[in-house]
Image: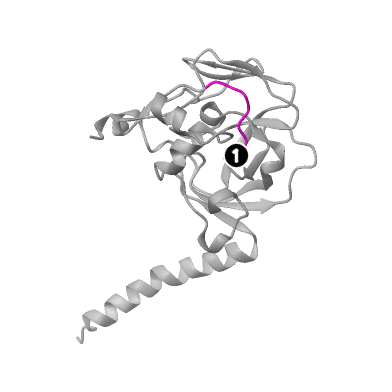
């Protein structure tokens, strides 16, 4: 029996993979989907919607990182890096940007400072509500947020964050963000976020449940 040439097999296999992916991305573009590949939220596609009219706990939102929105709050971490942040800039985000930890939007797709990709997070507290950072994690309005313990070093690199023991009331015009994934980069590191930075709402469209937990403590400790 005649066997197809290797090139034919390869082309066929490639088409079987690429065509469904191309179709999926075409649907995503038409339906205003965004692809999340971070460990903050489950991996997959989220549908973008309008900004919430009345921001509340539990809302999923995407927003511009508060790079130039530095509230008068304390940070802990490498003193040289904290002091190196330009006046008025957020020290934690300054570290993340200079350390190349954050993704950038292609061709200026988003109107965020430095063409940074928006963050996708969950609203955990709004103006007037209280937040406390403990060794066990972040307590928002008296409730310990699951998997919210601050990680002070990732892959051996010291990470700037709000000090353990921080207690604050969210100022007017701000909110506290949270994400359930392992080593999620949240307000526990860079502080409350201006509500005006919110670009829109998010709802899961096609995601992999539990995929936000793949980067475990064991993997992190095995890194050089």
Q: Quadrant of residue 123?
A: top right
> Which color scheme does this rendered protein use?
one colour
The verdict on residue 162 being magenta is: no
The structure residue drawn at horizontal position 28% and vertical position 76%, both measured from the top left corner, is 10
- Seen as rendered, the residue at the extreme bottom is 2
Q: Quadrant of the N terminus?
A: bottom left
What residue is shown with label 1?
A: 68
- Seen as rendered, the residue at the extreme front is 87
The structure residue drawn at horizontal position 56% and vertical position 23%, both measured from the top left corner, is 145
Compare residues 201 and 108 and report the one nearer the observer: 108
Compare residues 222 and 172 and report the one nearer the observer: 172
Left or right for 216, reference 141? left
Whether residue 180 is visible to the viewer of this picture, yes or no, is no
Q: Residues within 10 Å of mark 1 (few under 14, many from 20)?
A: some
**Predominant SS along the magenta part:** loop
Is 123 above or below relative to 202? above
Is 87 above or below relative to 168? below
Whether residue 170 is visible to the viewer of this picture, yes or no, is yes
The structure residue drawn at horizontal position 50% and vertical position 23%, both measured from the top left corner, is 75
- Residue 134: percent from the left, percent from the top? 51, 14
- Residue 207: percent from the left, percent from the top? 52, 49
Badge 1 element: loop
- Seen as rendered, the residue at the extreme right is 53
- Residue 188: percent from the left, percent from the top? 53, 26
Q: Quadrant of residue 159?
A: top left
Compare residues 201 and 70 and report the one nearer the observer: 70
The structure residue drawn at horizontal position 56% and vertical position 60%, both measured from the top left corner, is 108
Q: Which residues are magenta?
A: 69-74
């Amino acid at each position: 029996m005649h066997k197809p040439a290797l090139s034919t097999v390869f082309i066929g296999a490639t088409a079987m993979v690429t065509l469904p992916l191309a179709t999926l991305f075409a649907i995503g573009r038409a339906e205003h989907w965004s692809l999340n590949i971070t460990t903050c939220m489950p991996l997959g596609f989220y549908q973008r919607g309008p900004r919430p009219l009345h921001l509340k706990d539990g809302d999923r939102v995407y927003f511009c990182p508060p790079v130039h929105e530095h509230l008068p709050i304390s940070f802990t971490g490498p003193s040289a890096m904290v002091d190196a942040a330009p006046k008025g800039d957020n020290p934690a985000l300054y570290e993340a940007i200079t350390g190349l930890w954050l993704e950038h939007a292609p061709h200026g797709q988003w109107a965020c400072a430095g063409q940074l990709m928006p963050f996708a997070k969950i609203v955990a507290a709004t103006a007037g509500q209280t937040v406390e950072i403990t060794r066990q994690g972040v307590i928002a309005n008296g409730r310990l947020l699951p998997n919210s313990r601050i990680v002070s070093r990732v892959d051996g690199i010291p990470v700037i964050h709000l000090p353990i023991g921080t207690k604050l009331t969210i100022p007017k015009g701000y909110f506290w963000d949270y994400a359930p994934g392992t080593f999620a980069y949240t307000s526990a590191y860079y502080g409350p976020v201006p509500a005006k930075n919110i670009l829109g709402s998010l709802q899961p469209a096609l995601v992999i449940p539990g995929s936000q937990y793949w980067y475990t403590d064991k993997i992190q400790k095995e890194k050089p």
